[in-house]
Amino acid sequence: MAQEMFEGCRDPLALPQPNREIQTLRVGFRGGRVKSMRNLTHDTYEIVVECEDKRKIGEAGQFWTIRVPGIRKPRPYSFARAPESENPGEHTFYIRLVPGGELSAWLAGGDCVGEEVTLSGPLGKFKLDPSDEDMVCIAGGSGMSAVHAIIEHAVNLRVARNCYFFYGARTQKDLYLNEEIEALQKRWHPDYVLKFHQVLNEEPEDSDWTGGRGLVTDYFKQHYLATGQVSVDRMKAYFCGPPPMIDAGISVLQKAGLANRNIFYDKFEDARSPVPVIDNSKCVLCDECLMVKPVENCIVEVSSLHRTDGGSPGTMEYEEVEPAATAGLYYNTLYINEKECIRCYACVEICPAKAISPDFTPMPRTLADIVD
Ligand SMILES: Cc1cc2nc3c(=O)[nH]c(=O)nc-3n(C[C@H](O)[C@H](O)[C@H](O)COP(=O)(O)OP(=O)(O)OC[C@H]3O[C@@H](n4cnc5c(N)ncnc54)[C@H](O)[C@@H]3O)c2cc1C
Ligand code: SF4
Ligand code: SF4
């Protein structure tokens, strides 16, 4: 989930303001083919998708969903390059295999070059901020993708600010992109630094590794925050990768006094993550969630919802609104169907009324009490 965190209380009488950027965030579809595929590590691939539509859209930090042959639902993947650095029509992704994962099995199953895929997006609000404050970037695993894109974008813009990039992995065999980061360091603004630290948490004690050890967030705290090399008074933090790493990093910086508005993150949720729930009593009918959803039926307008046995999310039976056919009053009840949702959290981010959250009780609340 990519999210900008805001502070402060809202005036309860003020209506939530729809997002003015919504038109640029509206989801689009592009057909393409896998142009190339290479191993970055033993379990991480770079794939480049080439689309017929050559227009450059989206910003570093955002993501596309990719639908591949034989798998019903698409999956979200972050841009691994700044869009302005890509060849026209090309989109680069870094994908790490997940044990038991469907798309992972497709990727590991052989040569995917030439396979037809469909992209939808671009989605997400994780992106470079326009300030000149120090950037602290912390990534783990395939979270390298979005952070690499953001740093490449910062280099292209020739930003005049320092950047401290900490990358967490298990062992040396999980490291990649050294040459590419070195190249970005050479192009960084000469009056400022782009520092890069790799931190390993499962590297054998007796190995030849001389870099950082332990959890990447602990390393950052001990070597940079505690020593005053960076200060929360002049800092923007970017996190990308596994949700537990991001939660740990946010906690470190919040305790050090960094305001939530200076923390940006992109959590790589997957099928194991909780499905978001819509609280229809907060919904202001703006339709923005419907405009950014990358899957046709993940959010449905329903005229009735019925619990089935157990009443857990995704086990609700519903009657979809058909304007010409549905009898009776339309109660504006939106429902997220767990079976279709791909946990991209685009709807959570976009909702101006904070009516969608994975933390809400699984039982949807409705404007009228129509849940049986
Ligand atoms: C915004 C965003 C950006 C992302 N960017 C990247 C990226 O750049 N690179 C990257 O590698 N990944 C990224 N991801 C993660 C990616 O979208 C996929 O989730 C990941 O690649 C796994 O896909 P899969 O099809 O292989 O696994 P899936 O088939 O989706 O399964 C994932 C895991 O869940 C388990 N599982 C499946 N169904 C269930 C179920 N019903 N109950 C319990 N467990 C279940 C599987 O066994 C497996 O372990 C991103 C995610 C998000 C939300
Ligand atoms: S319901 Fe929300 S989180 Fe789920 S796929 Fe649709 S937009 Fe993404
Ligand atoms: S739930 Fe959807 S329609 Fe309702 S306020 Fe949020 S974004 Fe708008």
Image (tube, rainbow, N blue to C red):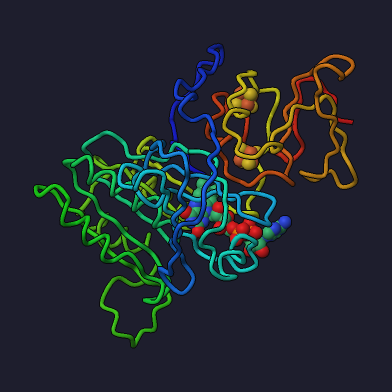
> Looking at the image, is 246 positioned above or below residue 341?
below
Question: Image quadrant of residue 316?
Answer: top right
Front residue of 145/16: it is 145
How many marks on residues?
Answer: 0
Nearer to us in this view, 337 or 229: 337
Q: In this image, 50 relative to 104: left or right?
A: left
The outermost residue toward the bottom is 206
Q: Which quadrant does the C terminus fall into?
A: top right
Q: Residue at x 52, y 59 (%)?
A: 114
| Residue placed most toward the observer, 10 or 86 | 86
Residue 110 appears at what percent x and percent y? 56, 71
Compared across the picture, whether 136 is left or right of 42 comes to left
Q: Residue at x 42, y 60 (%)?
A: 140
Ligand 3: image quarter:
top right
Q: Residue furthest top?
A: 13
Q: Residue at x 21, y 59 (%)?
A: 183
Where residue 323 sits: x, y (%)? Answer: 80, 18
Q: Position of residue 289 (x, y in %)?
A: 60, 29
| Quadrant housing residue 272 | bottom right
Whether residue 272 is visible, yes or no, is: no
- Write the residue at 69% across / 29% down: 279
Left or right of residue 205: residue 158: left
Which residue reaches farthest left?
191
Please say if 5 is above or below 353: below
Tell me if I can see residue 332 in this picture: yes
Residue 290, image x, y percentages: 63, 28
